[in-house]
Image (cartoon, coloured by chain):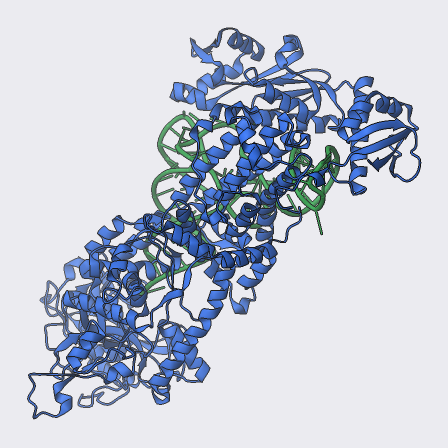
Amino acid sequence: MSQQHPQPFPALPAQIDLPAVEHDVLRRWEEQKVFERSLEQTRGGPNWVFFEGPPTANGEPGVHHIEARVFKDVFPRFKTMKGYHVERKAGWDCHGLPVEVAVEKELGLSGKRDIEEFGVAEFNRRCRESVQRNVDAFTAMTERMGYWVNMDEAYRTMDPEYVESVWWALKTIWDKGLLVQDYRISPYCPRCGTTLSDHELAQGYETVTDPSVYVRFPVTSGPLADAGRPTSLLVWTTTPWTLVSNTAVAVHPDVAYVVATDGTERVVVAEPLLSAALGDGWEPTGERFEGAEMERWTYQRPFELVDFPEPAHYVVLADYVTVDDGTGLVHQSPAFGADDMAVARSYGLPVVKPVRADGTFEAGLDLVGGVFFKTADATLVADLKDRGLLFRHLDYEHSYPHCWRCHTALLYYALPSWYIRTTAAKDELLAQNERTNWYPENIKHGRYGEWLRNNIDWSLSRSRYWGTPLPIWEFPDGRRICVGSLAELSELSGQDLSALDPHRPYVDDIVIPDPDADPALPLEQRVARRVPEVIDAWFDSGSMPFAQWGAPHRNDAVFRANFPGDYICEAIDQTRGWFYSLMAVSTLVFGENSYRNVLCLGHILAEDGRKMSKHLGNILEPMEIMDRHGADALRWFMAASGSPWAPRRVGHAALEEIVRKVLLTYYNTVSFFTLYANAGDTWDHSRLAEAPAPQDRPLLDRWMLSELNRLVRDVDAAMEDFDTAAAGRLLTSFVDDLSNWYVRRSRRRFWAGAAAPAGASAFATLFECLETLTLLMAPLVPFLADHVWAALRRPDAPESVHLAPWPEAREDLVDTDLSAQMALTRRLVELGRAARVDSGRRTRQPLARVLVGAKGFDALAEQLRDQITEELNVQRLDPLSVVGGDLVDYAVKPNFRALGKRFGKRTPLVAAAIGAQDAKELVDRVRATGWAHVPVEGEAVDVSADELLITEQPREGWAVASENGETVALDLDVTPELQRAGLAREVIRLVQDLRKSSGLDISDRISLWWRAEDPTTGQAVAEHAAWIGAEVLAGEVVNGEPDGEAHSVASPEFGVTFWLRKL
RNA sequence: GGGCGUAUAGCUCAGUCGGUUAGAGCGCAUCCCUGAUAAGGAUGAGGCCCCAGGUUCAAGUCCUGGUACGCCCA
């Protein structure tokens, strides 16, 4: 029969190769230019501005790159369906140390000296090349995962227009006086003459033995200065060479310090360290000071070898001082320690640096002149001892950073460096943070807010090669110019530089002549040269909102229409990275943060719970995963598995589960629909108009449509709240309801066919559910959703689901009362199933009666009662009350939630009183009057039915299951009539199996013959022949064997044989 | 050392406004159903809701402290 009608839907086989489908869909997107059209058709609509955080195109892409890219795709798709215009400009972060390190490795270079010998021009050319190589791998992965982003017009932070925009931003900050030069303490190798990055630092720790010395610093002012006998601060250090430049002594403001004496001298130490630092023979004198009281006490410094330009050598307060080691008094030498430097800045102390860049002390100094810093220790300690200042000298074994190349001990060394005074904008940053929505919210005032509150100036400059050159030119007399564009530089330098590559070394060759200089001076003395540094690559990426357009020099209007952004998303490691650099740059330059909503994801871990890394061998390649499970499965995992804010483990098992439970259940429901829509009197979209109005459909359909519209409302709310996990849970549970309840309970109506009255509603309802569900699924699983859409779509609907509008919930179809009734129905069915299992009566055996005792059962609609009898295969459904009260056991429990509201503190008493009552009497009274009195502390208290949890169970001859006050009881009596009906069901199943194994189409008609050896089965078949024939589509059911060929099946269990032949 | 987060079944995770019988999936066991069938369903075993205090009539849920792990920073 199916051949008589053209099939309205393409056949969707139950088996599906998801990765293959995805490749088809990718091809279709490409051919039909779906992404471009989705942008085209929203043009003119409101903008929803998305900023792509540029991945560093350094190294191969990994699974963790998929994570953020899923979220960067889902919400733009969602907003596009809602009618917004969402530009998606890709970007690449090109500069920075990681690129340099990779190229150094490739070239076999080691360190800055090598790079300079190799040639900066060629080195930077290689860096540029390396970046471009990796972009290809990212592009392939991005396309495969279905991330729609415009890579043809991607911005690159190394492009001249981009660099110019960054220069402009720097100049803006310069003009505000917030770009300044200051000392920065960096780990520095004096032999290689270079600073080391944190990454390099981590590679070079070695265990060494250093002197650990306790030194007396005699107090020269304050209450202890005139104590009659000399009193000294006892100061501990493991770097005696830094005592030459001792500048101050730091104490913790909240720690107690005491004076101790051995009878001859007096020293000051932290109270908790008294015995540890001094050993035996020392007694506290009773003099005791809070650290805060000691501020500005002066002392006699240990060496008088260098000059100090400003006042120094007094006690300062610092929170970082601990009482774990030493004496609780910490020697300060700001040129050689980051903490020391910070403290010195806050006190305005001078930075004295007697060690030269090669690691030796300045030549003219007494005692240590020209000596390498580390070897000066012995000389200095000996001198302290000679002068009686050395209190104690030990050896101290600890881990100290060394140069990973030459193993020279590193120097923490103050070098001139460029800073952005973000601390000056701290209040504004905090205010901008308040106006920004963080997901999850705790980041805002937690990890990120904390970072802002402890803001430190942004250390901007890097003494490297492959980066945006710092656009500051300096004259010999110290005057400086910050340049904001190539045009400006052209003008200042007097040459056309519009085609200049604004990278090193070319930009280093540009000089700016001083128009006012004496022409007689040599050239070098009347031109400005660029400072040698490049800038932190984070400043590049933080500038992307304007620099991606080359604004303000180019596309300024485009930039202004796309600022600030509505949405950015990265993993949590970006809080102090991109999230901060974006906020800092735009707040400093525009006085406004550049993003409104920021999604902050947890990290992706390997299945073993560890980070994926090559040496652990637990890496999953993204392309391999997608070829095995499909990109949709991986996308669903990222978006909806667990909580995106938390770290998550990805593995094959998790992805297989998603495929089976979510994607295939959804797809199989669609496949089921097309199977029946294509069969018999086919169903096509024109029948939608003939279907009854939703409110006139059977309750099962009305329930499903109610659930559907609730789903639309809730998924929309979840997506608006950037909560894909909630959306995923809602969708999963809907798919389960649709497949395992609605379709399961509606199968007979689909068998009846599209033309049958029963089928009209079912087909329409299922179609509407699938159509809307597919729209809701589209942002999360764009491939499968579009595949389904292509199969199901109405003739006038958009070609792709991604060109279709987001659905709107029809609140008028949401029926919460019906939802509650259906929930009760399903709970009762579950109880009935449990009772059947206990009783050992298989479901094919019809039973006479089921009894139900449950609140709300009386109000349960007839159609829903029918669902229960059908699903449980029973003939009658009655309330438990039809059984005489004497045959039923009652149990009553207090409903605490209800009682608590009314009785508060007395709840336990009322609960106890309820438990003490005779259950049956209590139930009778409540049933009769709606209230019952229970005695509580001599007083009669009313309780209502709602405040009780009543469970009732029949005593004899029933299979009973109850839960939460709801009871289902099955009549176990199987009469001969019931037995024969059960046998008829058995043979129907037998014949259905035969149909299937014979390869018949679901709508093929047959002739059926049978012969029974078992008399009871024979009687059952004869008695139910009409029913059997109708069920198995047999035109005739003949007792006897067929002539000629026929498919046959014999059942020894029931003593019957069947033959069938297709009509 | 500091900040932030996480901790619920063997595993992966839900758990709303605090309510006394804490759920799902996977895995395991035993079954059932089947014209979606290499699917589906039921039942069962499996819980110190990390620990200790506190608030409350009532705590997996709120508060304080601790432990372990993770991330960021020093």
Relative to A272, A927 lies left or right = right
Q: Quadrant of the C terminus of chain A?
A: top right
Q: Establish if A335 lies above or below A813.
A: below
Task: Give percent across and percent down for residue A719.
Answer: 41, 44
Chain coloured green: B
Asked whether, in this view, residue A630 is left or right of residue A41, the answer is right
Of residues A221 and A1013, the one drawn nearer to the viewer in this rendering: A1013
Between A784 and A861, the one lying in front of the other is A784
| Residue A65 image point, x, y percent | 46, 61
Residue A608, quarter of picture: bottom right
- The answer to which of A914 and A489 lies nearer the viewer is A489
Identify which residue is drawn at 40% across, 39% down: A717
Return the residue nearer the eye: A93 or A182: A93
Lateral position of residue A562 relative to residue A424, left or right: right
- The colour of chain A is blue
Instruction: In the rendered view, tell whether residue A723 sits above or below residue A604.
Output: above
* Res A262 seen here: no
Relative to A711, residue A215 above or below: below
In the rendered picture of this protein, how many numbered marks are placed on residues?
Answer: 0
Q: In x, y percent, where is residue A931?
A: 47, 9
Q: Is residue A789 visible?
A: yes
Above or below, A44 against A545 in this view is above
Q: Quadrant of the N terminus of chain A?
A: top right
Q: Is residue A25 left or right of residue A85?
A: right
Residue A1000 is situated, as x and y percent measured from the top left of the image, at 78, 40
